[in-house]
Amino acid sequence: MRFGFQVRVDKGFKEALHYALELGCETIQTLITSPLSWKISKNPDEFKWYISELKENDIYPIAIHSPYLLNLASPEEDVYKKSVLILIEHLRFAEEGGADFVIVHAGSHKDEGVEIGMERLTQALRMILEYHKGKAMLLVENTAGGGSGMCSSIEEMEMLLENVNSDKIGICLDICHLFAAGYDLRTADKVAELSNKVESKLGEKVKLIHLNDCRSPLGSKVDRHESLGKGNIGIKGIKAIINDSFFSQLPAIMETPYDPEEDRYNIYLAKYLRDEA
């Protein structure tokens, strides 16, 4: 398992690269626009340089996370269309810069029901694929299930993959979201049980995990990330995930609450648990 963070770029790509190298990142995720903005950004001047430098320093794979406002399952036409357009733009940036993945949250059906939400999400992904013919993969991230969140279950993710049926679409599994959605990950046995289910139903479509502990209780449907071992999953569960035969083959991005000291703690602990095994 390769470890990294969602590294902030608000101070520029050079500073982001320096921070990633200082932490000892082995993989990375970044935002190329404000996560809370609808504005479609122009391609930053240093973006290609940034990707090139990451690769030169053996940091891979490289993921871009789309803005959090996007909702590909939305029943609201304006939100739906803007979400599709911004995601197409992000995939173009990824292709031009040489990034491997673009990650998008599965979105919310806004109380319209899973069936309608799945139809909207499937349609959106098919439209996006009409424009995107490059190598970068689009990874759909599972939700915690709160607020009518889509793809909070393994079965819904499997259904989405079957509906779209494209080698350009994969899955990003967020560990905190799984726990909040009701999947117990506190022991090695529970992790192995989930791992077997994921491998059976989603298999090689899972390309990356978000390795976050969960501040919220099991099944709460509340998305609250926490540093490794400091949440309700706990150190035993995190260690089991890192060393699981299926999960250990995937790159892991930490989206723990931003704090330089906590970042150093998290990546040290993750590598220690990996190396200890």
Image (cartoon, rainbow, N blue to C red):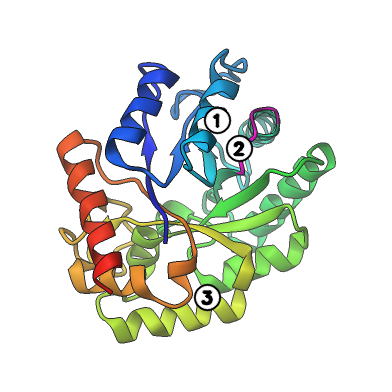
Which residue lies at the image location 23% right of the left edge and 70% below the top edge?
276
The span from disc 1 to disc 2 (Cα, nearest Å) is 7 Å
- Name the residue type under label 3: Val
Q: Position of residue 103 (x, y in %)?
A: 55, 45
- The stretch of residues the image draws in magenta is 96-100
- First in residue order: circle 3 vs circle 1: 1
Which residue lies at the image location 28% right of the left edge and 39% below the top edge?
23
- First in residue order: circle 1 vs circle 2: 1
Q: Mark 1 points at which residue?
A: 51
Q: Are dots 1 and 2 in contact, CB under 8 Å?
A: yes
The span from disc 3 to disc 2 (Cα, nearest Å) is 25 Å
Q: Where is residue 62 in the image (x, y as percent from the top left)?
A: 53, 41
**Residue mark closest to the camera, 3 vs 1:** 1
Which residue lies at the image location 47% right of the left edge and 31% below the top edge?
31
Q: Is residue 184 magenta?
A: no
Q: Where is residue 85 in the image (x, y as percent from the top left)?
A: 69, 30
**Residue 227 in sight:** no
**Residue mark closest to the camera, 3 vs 2:** 2
- Name the residue type under label 2: Ala
Which residue lies at the image location 62% right of the left edge and 38% below the top edge?
76
- The answer to whether residue 86 is left or right of residue 164 is left
Q: Name the residue under label 3.
A: 198
Q: Mark 2 points at which residue?
A: 99
Image: 38 above or below 232: above
The residue closer to the viewer here, 190 or 116, is 190
The residue closer to the viewer here, 148 or 267, is 267
- First in residue order: circle 3 vs circle 2: 2
Q: Where is residue 132 in the image (x, y as percent from the top left)?
A: 78, 39
Q: Is mark 1 on a helix, strand or loop?
A: helix
The residue closer to the viewer here, 6 or 46, is 46
